[in-house]
Image (cartoon, helix red, strand yellow):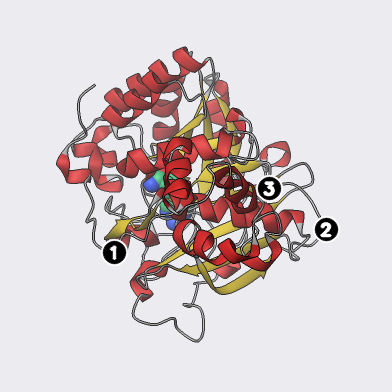
Amino acid sequence: MTALPLVFDAPRRGMPPRHLADLTREEARAAVTELGQPAFRADQLARHFYRGVTDPALMTDLPAAARQDLTEALLPGLLTVVRHQTADNGRTRKTLWRLHDGALVESVLMRYPDRATVCISSQAGCGMACPFCATGQSGLTRNLSAAEIIGQAVAAAAAMANGELDGGPGRLSNVVFMGMGEPLANYARVRKTLDALLTPAPHGLGLSQRAVTVSTVGLVPAIRRLTDEGRNVTLAVSLHAPDDELRDTLVPINTRWKVGEVIDAADAYARKTGRRYSVEYALIRDVNDQPFRADLLGTLLAGRLAHVNLIPLNPTPGSPWDASPLPAQREFVARLRAAGVATTVRDTRGQDIDGACGQLAAADRVEGVPAVALPTPQLEPPVPLGDEADQADGA
Ligand code: SAH
C-alpha cells in the first residue's frame, strides 16, 4: 500500500493529550497497569467513556482513591461546549466545541422520525479549499485526534439517550463525516474512529456499518486504502461536476485526481463492499446545474452502483453563489432519473443556524467566539421535491 502524499500531512502542533480512545485495548490495559491498577480498569473506563459519563464521581465501580488519577491520565476532557444552537423545532442541534488548544470545531445532531444522525468534524478547518464551502475558506488548522472525533459521536449518543433533543430519549443511529475537514486527509485517526463507532459496547458505540458514511473530495489513494481494509461503511464522493474542466475549479484537488479516477476508485469500493456509494452534487445556480451537465452526469453514472444526492447549495458568507432555482433542480433530477440513475435531494437541516452542509466555519473564529452567529444570507428554504427530500445523511 502506497503512503499518502505528504501534502495531506497536516500540522501536528496542537495535538491533545493522550486519551483512552486513541489507544488500542492492549495499550489502554498497559497504561492502566503503569498507574498501578489492574488491567480490567481499562474496560471500566471504556464503558464510562462510551456511555458519555465524564464525572469521576459517577464512576462508582472504580475505587474512589483511583478515580481522579485514572480519569486524568486516560479520560482528559478534550471537548468543551462553547454553545449549542437549535433549529427545526428542536430537532437539529449544532454544537460549537473548543479543543484544548483553543481550536474550534462544530458537530450537528439531527433527529428524524426513524433515525438520529450526527454530522462530525475530522479536522479543525480544511485544506481542500472548495470555493463554495465555508470551511474550505479558512484553511486547515490541524487534524483532530481520534479521541476528539470519537468524542463528538459519544456526546451525540449521550444527548440522544438523555433526551436532550426534542422528542424524548432516543438512540444515535447514524454518523456522517460531513462536518469540518476532509476525513481521508486524516486517515489513520478516522480509521480508528470507524473502529470505535462500529465496535460493540463497552469498547465502542456499536453502530452498523451502513449507518456510518465517510464523505470525501476524492483522495483516490485513501479510497483504495479504505477499500483494502474492509471496513464496509458507506462511501460518499463529493463530485459536484461531471467534467474535469468545471470540477478543477469547484473541487481543486481534481487537478490531482480526475473525475474518472475518483469514479473508478468508488466503483472498486462498491464492488468490494457490495454497497452503493453516494455521489454528492451541490446544485449551484448557473454554475453546475445546466441540463447538459445533468446528461453528462447521467451518462457517467448509468449502470454503476451509485446514487446521486443533490444538495441545493447552502449560502456561505461572502460567496456570490446561490442554490439552483426549483425548476432547474426538478429538471436536473428528471434527467438523471431518465438516465436510470437513482437520485435524491438532500434536505437542508440547520440552515438558519449555519449548520447545514458547507456552512461550518468555526475555525476562522479561533481568536474569540463572536457574541452573535455570523450573518447568513436569507434564501428561500428549498421546497421538497416529493418523496426524495429525506436524504440528510446520504445513507
Ligand atoms: N470534506 C468532505 C466532507 C465535507 S462536507 C467532502 O468534501 O466530502 C459534506 C458535503 O457538503 C460535501 O459534499 C461538500 O462538498 C458539501 N458542501 C460543502 N459546502 C456546501 C454548500 N455551501 N452547500 C451545499 N453543500 C456543500
- SS for dot 3: loop
Mark 1: secondary structure = loop
Nearest to viewer (mark 3 / mark 2): 2
Residue 216, horizontal then vertical, whole percent: 39, 39
Distance (Cα) linking label 3 and label 1: 43 Å
Left or right of 318 in this view: 155: right
Q: Is residue 11 left or right of residue 311?
A: left
Q: Quadrant of residue 114?
A: top right
Note whether 273 is above or below 83 in the view shown: above
Q: Is residue 239 visible?
A: yes
In this view, the residue in front, 33 or 42, is: 33
Give the quarter of the image for residue 353: bottom right
Query: Which-is-in-front pick, marks 2 and 1?
Result: 1
Name which of mark 3 and mark 1 comes first in the sequence.
1
Q: Which mark is residue 384?
A: 3
Distance between mark 3 and mark 2 Cα atoms = 23 Å
| Type of amino acid at the residue the image marks with label 1 | Gly
The answer to which of marks 3 and 2 sits earlier in the sequence is 2
The answer to whether the residues at label 2 and label 1 have Cβ atoms under 8 Å apart is no
Residues under labels 2 and 1: Cα distance?
A: 38 Å
Seen at 62% across and 71% down, the residue is 85
The image shows residue 61 at horizontal and vertical percentages of 70, 54
Q: Give the structural element (helix, strand or loop) at label 2.
A: loop
Badge 2: residue crowd in 10 Å (few <14, some 14–19, many ≥20):
some
Question: Looking at the picture, which amino acid does disc 2 mark?
Answer: Gly
Quarter that holds the C terminus: top right
Q: Residue at x 23, y 52 (%)?
A: 10
Label 1: which residue? 14
Q: Find residue 167 and name its label.
A: 2
Q: Residues within 10 Å of mark 1 (few under 14, many from 20)?
A: some
Is there any visible trace of residue 324 in the rendered image?
no
Q: Residues within 10 Å of mark 3 (few under 14, many from 20)?
A: few
